[in-house]
Amino acid sequence: MVEKHSDLFHIPFTRFIEPFLGSGAVFFSLSPEQSILCDKNKQLINTYRAIRGGWKMVEHHLKVHHDKHSKEYYYKIRAMNFITEEEKAAQFIYLNRTCWNGLYRVNLNGQFNVPIGTKSNVVLSTDNFEKISSLLANAILIDGDFKQAIDLSTSGDFVFVDPPYTVKHNHNGFVKYNECLFSWDDQIRLRDSVKSAAQRGAHVLVTNAHHDCIKELYAGIGEFISLSRASVISGSANARGKYEEMVIKCF
């Protein structure tokens, strides 16, 4: 998104805040000196923490997974409960890279349950865990609700908000992949947090579903910009394609 819509990110700031971190694509592209990074997925945040504090061991364990990868090995690793943070991080990355469509989904017990996919490359030529560790050195990492991160924002901060896209009637085709769906009440809480952050002087950029209820929700708070984004998570290739989304520029 940063490369395709780089003009949206030409924002002067002293600190970067991302309350829905995910892959961290925007964070790693901007490479800010100061940041607050948050995600509700505790395993994801712990993976970043492990890379920051012990990237060499994470890389070592990932290479072992690469050498042993097979269908039988995948399900064996998927079922295991590792002890060290570096082992857990390597497991998380391994499963993400070799599961179906790179999907992250857990059952009601919080157990990862995505079947094996077609990709077998575990160690990638683009891997640079040392650089990732360096970029995360001055980051505050939070595993929890988005509000924890947004409430820390103040004047001079740039807050990039990319939440799960749900709409008021939940008829937008997005699927419930995690334990708890990001509900409409969560969307209202998010709007309130964004509004408060903007009032404190933070520059906030929000992405969301291109839907009338989102326009109504953020009416009077920011400028609406329509964009298109590719969707790759679908059981059928025919169901994948480009979808309209909304960007709300609150500054």
Image (cartoon, rainbow, N blue to C red):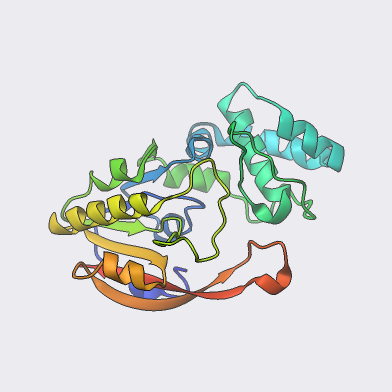
Q: Can residue 18 be seen in the rendering of this structure?
A: no
Drawn side of residue 191 relative to residue 116, left or right: left
- Please tell me whether residue 43 is drawn above or below residue 239 in the rendered image: above
Question: In screen coordinates, is 51 left or right of 209?
Answer: right
User: How many dots with numbers?
Assistant: 0
Residue at 57% across, 56% down = 175
Q: Residue at x 72, y 48 (%)?
A: 99
Q: Point out residue 142 in the picture as x, y percentages from the top left corner.
A: 38, 37
- Where is 93 relative to 248, above or below? above
Check the image and report above or below for 151 versus 109.
below
Q: Position of residue 104 (x, y in %)?
A: 61, 47
Residue 206 x, y percent position in the rendering:
34, 63
- Residue at 58% across / 33% down in the picture? 110
Residue 84 appearing in the image: yes
Question: Which residue is nearer to you in this view: 129 or 50?
Answer: 50
Decide if residue 33 is on the left or right side of residue 128.
left
Can you give x and y, in whole percent of width and height, for residue 18 in the image?
Answer: 36, 51
- Which residue of the protein is positioned furthest toward the top in this rendering? 83
Is residue 179 shown left or right of residue 226?
right
Residue drawn at x 80%, y 55% as measured from the top left: 118
Q: Quadrant of the C terminus?
A: bottom left
Between 246 and 47, the residue placed more toward the observer is 246
